[in-house]
Structures are given as C-alpha cells and as structure tokens.
Amino acid sequence: MDINSFLLLVLVLALLLVLYLALKLRHVREQISLIKDALEDLKGGNLNRRILAHKNDMTRQICYDINEIGVNSQSRLIQQRQAEKAYKRLMTGLSHDVKTPLVSLVGYLEAIENGLVTGEEKDEYIHVASDKAHRLKDFVTALFEWVKLDAREQVFHFELFDLNELSRSIMAEWVPILESAGLDYDIEIPETECSVRVDPNAYTRILNNLLENIIVHSEAKYMALHIIEDVQQAKITVIDNGKGIAANDLPHIFERMYQCDHSRSAKGNGLGLAIAKELVNAHKGTIIASSTSGSGSTFTIVLPKAL
C-alpha cells in the first residue's frame, strides 16, 4: 500500500470516527433533553413520568436512578395519602366515641345536680353516669395504649416463660367471667412446658382483648382456647360459635378504630384487636382471623419458641 492510499484510509477512518462521535453526541444530547423534561415533570408533580433507556446508552444509569426516584416518590405519596385518610377516619371516630358518651354523661350529671330526678330515679341516673364514665375511661386508656404502640414508645420486658402455665393462669381468671356471661367453654392447654420469650403483661392483654371481643361482640354461647406446639412455634387458637364476621369486614378487623357494627350502636372502641395485633407483632409472631358470617370466628396466634 502506497502512502496516498494509507492517508486516504486514515482520512476515511477519521471521518467515520467523527461521524460516530457526532451521532453519539446527538443521542446523548437527546437523552439529556429527555432527562431535563422528566425532571421538570417530576418537579411539577407528575410522578408517573419515566425515561426509556437502552442497554448501551451512556446515560442509562442516570435514567434508571431517576426512574427509581419517581417510583419511590410515588410510593411515598400513596402511603402519605393512605395515612391522611386513616388519620381522618381516626379523628372522625374519636370525635364520635369521645363526644357522644361525654355529652350523655354531662346530661345525666346536670339532671342530678339540678334536682330534676330524685329517689330511685336519681340512683339510676348515677349508675348510668358511672357506667358511661368508666366506658369513657376505658376508651381513653386503650387509645393511649394504641398511640404508644403506634409510636414505638411501648416498653416491653421479654422473659422466658412457660407459655402453657402462663395461659392457664390467665384463663383461670376468665372462667368465672365466662360462666357469668353464660358461655360454655373448652380450654385445652398441654401439661408439658413450652418455653417462649414473652412480655407477660402484653401476652395477657392479647388474650384479654380476644376474649373481651367474644363477650362484647360475638353473641356466642361457646368459646374454646387450644394451644398446640411443635419444635419451632406455639399456636394459640381462640374459637367462638357466635354471629361471625362478614366477608367485607374480615380484612379490616385489625385496623384501628374499625368496627364491624357500622352503626356504632354496639359497645367497644375499635381498638382491642388492633392493639392485640401490635402486641403480637412485638413478639415477632402472627395473628390471623377466619370467619363465616353466622358460623363463628377463629383467631390464631403463632409465637416463636425460645430455641
């Protein structure tokens, strides 16, 4: 190859390289323009905006990162809106559950104070006022407990306990309550030792809330508590033969302030099951509910054993 041919070849290669770089630069400029437009859209609130990037694009990692920012921002926005809706529901529930008994309580007390009732009627008014005051106190206590749990401010004292023995102690206190409520019961707790790391007060509250839920809401005539265990976990099952839970209510029963009686005519504050779930979670356990309307309900708690 003579010198002229060599120079011509070099010139052609140089032109091709310049053309390639020019096309590459043009593509990069187009990508930068798309990135700029996408950032403007994201800044303006359009969190659905995404940038299409190819495997060999020089800006692909920037595009991927911007797309990830959009996805994460959209997710946070959805969570924020859900939290705002939950907060509004909570405030609506609070305004009703506090205001209604408080107004009624004030009415009874004013009638007593102004001498509008006397004798047995006055005693009855005092009894009703006292009952409403205690219900209001129970609600406020449960609310503060929920707030502490939700804010992760609840202090737990986890220790190794024989779950079977602890459960027997709790149920022994419930037997006269169940009998007074007219409920037949079946309690099956193994005699063997079952070591579980629990906060005894929290575990007691879990069972108390489930049993109170049966008495207050289920209209049951029978309840059962069974405990079975394997090598890794203990399963506590609480069963009733009451009216059950409607299918559309079942997914929401562990939500705070949720009440299956949407008329709010029944007793309860909608916090008991929510608190029970948070306490079970604190024990690194799970709680699920199954029910068929008109055929009773089953709550199953699974707690890890201390290995």
Image (cartoon, rainbow, N blue to C red):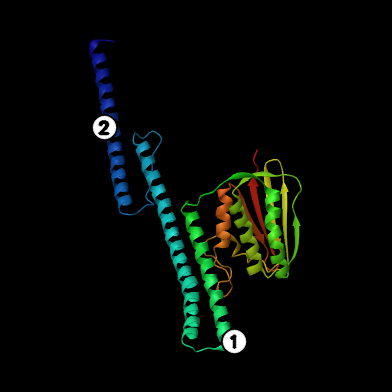
**Of tags 2 and 1, which is closer to the observer?**
1
Tag 1's secondary structure? helix
Please say if 289 is above or below 304.
below
Q: Position of residue 133 (x, y in %)?
A: 52, 73
Q: Which residue is mark 2?
A: 22
Tag 2's secondary structure? helix
**Image disc number at residue 120:** 1
Which sits in the foreground, 69 or 163?
163
Residue drawn at x 54%, y 63% is 271
Which sits in the foreground, 284 or 124?
124
Circle 1: residue type: Glu
**Image disc number at residue 250:** none
- The answer to whether residue 266 is left or right of residue 235 is left
Residue drawn at x 28%, y 30% is 21
Instruction: Name the quadrant containing residue 13.
Output: top left
Q: Position of residue 127 (x, y in %)?
A: 57, 79
If the image is split into quadrants, where does the C terminus sit? top right
Q: Position of residue 248 (x, y in %)?
A: 59, 65
- The answer to whether residue 45 is left or right of residue 82 is left
Circle 2: residue type: Ala
Please say if 118 is above or below 86.
below
If the image is split into quadrants, where does the N terminus sit? top left
Please say if 49 is above or below 17.
below
